[in-house]
């Protein structure tokens, strides 16, 4: 190669590298001396992370680790879908369930929202029949034989029985959940196994993909998967505008002025915004949050970054302090 050709090649390479959009914002946000907790969801948001501010601990599991969760809620059992997998369910009658051989778009498909399950609660003596779409985005289960399951959940006697059958036929998987069990996770490809996936401690925050409804959009685009933060059980939160009370000025004396709610997606997903100019996410510093976890237990928190040290997205960094 001639020296002129080498110089031309070097210039082209330099210009190409210089024009690449940075994966990470050039200037990290300024933050104070509070405690820091990191939830590493991965660049594809494939990890669900439970976080405890009181303990300063996090625990993550892959979102592919379960399909359904059975949870006792006030004298009934609620079946929750794996919203992190963008799962949907269509409840049908018993006769329709046995006759189903394909996943028609005309079925009454529904997905879980943060505070609303797609399926009706199960009471003693009842049966729920539904078709489960484990992965509407076809990220992990592209073949119908893996993507869909016909599921029946029956509460009879001392157990709740769950059965799952591939849509095109095949072996029937069964699970028995003893009545009194507070929570059990199942994976439809692991017959009989009741999975205990949550940490032994109480998480106040769950960093995860979930479904957010955009009601102003057509049905096809209305139910949209987002990466955000949900509140844990028995946790309430309030939003505070920094223009009203700066983060540094928020203390225990001001919490009585706040309006708290247990709405699970109050923190939600839009504490970050996508900047099309830089091709990166930026943090919205116009607001922060206060958590109430007991009569006198309060924490303030704000998001300070969405990238790891290598500039990869999906690492949610939170600054927090007890009040």
Image (cartoon, rainbow, N blue to C red):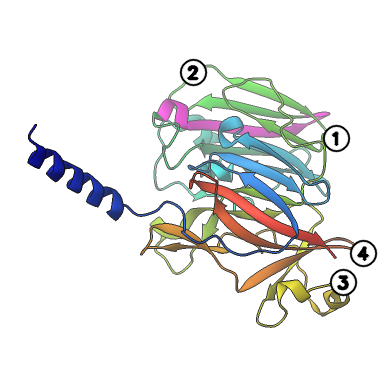
Between the residue at mark 2 and the residue at mark 1, the CA separation in whole angstroms equals 31 Å
Specify the segment rendered in magenta.
144-159
Q: Earlier in the sequence, mark 1 or mark 4?
A: 1
Residue 220 seen in the current view: yes
Q: Judge by depth and name the residue closer to the eye, 57 or 1.
A: 1
Q: Whole-percent x and y of residue 274?
A: 45, 61
First reached walking from the N terminus: tag 2 or tag 3: 2
- Per the image, the residue denoted by label 1 is 180
Q: What secondary structure is the magenta-colored segment mainly?
A: strand
Which quarter of the image is occupied by the C terminus? bottom right
Q: Does residue 307 show up magenta in the picture?
A: no
Q: Badge 4 is on which residue?
A: 296
Relative to 208, residue 143 above or below: above
Q: In front: 90, or 229? A: 229
Asked if one can make out residue 92 in the rendered structure from this viewpoint, the answer is no
| Residue to which mark 3 is pinned | 252
> What residue did someone put label 2 on?
170
Specify which label sits upstream in the sequence, 1 or 3. 1
- CA separation in Å, label 1 and label 4: 31 Å
Of circles 1 and 3, the one toward us is 3
CA gap between label 4 and label 3 equals 9 Å
Q: Quick one: which residue is furthest to the right in this view?
A: 296
Q: Are marks 2 and 4 in contact (CB under 8 Å)?
A: no
């Amino acid at each position: 190669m001639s020296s002129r050709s080498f110089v031309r090649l070097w210039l082209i390479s330099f210009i190409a590298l210089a024009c690449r959009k940075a994966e990470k914002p050039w200037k990290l946000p300024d933050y104070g001396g509070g405690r820091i907790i990191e939830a590493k969801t991965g660049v594809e948001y494939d990890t669900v992370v439970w976080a405890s501010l009181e303990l300063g601990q996090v625990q993550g599991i892959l979102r592919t680790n379960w399909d359904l969760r059975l949870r006792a809620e006030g004298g009934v059992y609620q079946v929750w879908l794996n919203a992190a997998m963008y799962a949907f369910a269509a409840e049908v009658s018993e006769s329709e369930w046995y006759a189903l051989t394909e996943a028609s778009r005309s079925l009454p498909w529904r997905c879980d929202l943060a505070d609303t399950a797609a399926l009706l609660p199960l009471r003693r003596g009842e049966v729920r029949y539904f078709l489960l779409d484990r992965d509407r985005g076809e990220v992990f289960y592209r073949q119908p034989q893996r993507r869909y399951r016909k599921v029946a959940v029956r509460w009879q006697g001392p157990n709740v029985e769950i059965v799952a059958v591939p849509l095109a036929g095949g072996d029937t998987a069964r699970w028995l959940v003893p009545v009194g069990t507070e929570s059990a996770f199942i994976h439809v490809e692991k017959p009989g196994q009741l999975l205990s996936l949550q940490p032994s401690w109480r998480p106040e925050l769950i960093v995860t993909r979930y479904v957010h409804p955009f009601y102003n959009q057509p049905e096809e685009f209305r139910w949209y998967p987002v990466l955000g933060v949900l509140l844990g059980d028995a946790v309430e939160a309030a939003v505070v505008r920094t223009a009203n009370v700066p983060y540094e000025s928020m203390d225990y004396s001001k919490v009585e002025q706040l309006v708290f709610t247990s709405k699970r997606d109050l923190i939600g997903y839009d504490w970050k915004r996508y900047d099309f100019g830089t091709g990166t996410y930026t943090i919205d510093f116009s607001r922060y949050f206060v958590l109430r976890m007991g009569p006198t237990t309060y924490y303030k928190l704000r998001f300070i970054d969405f990238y790891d040290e290598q500039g990869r997205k999906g690492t949610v960094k939170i600054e927090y302090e007890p009040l």
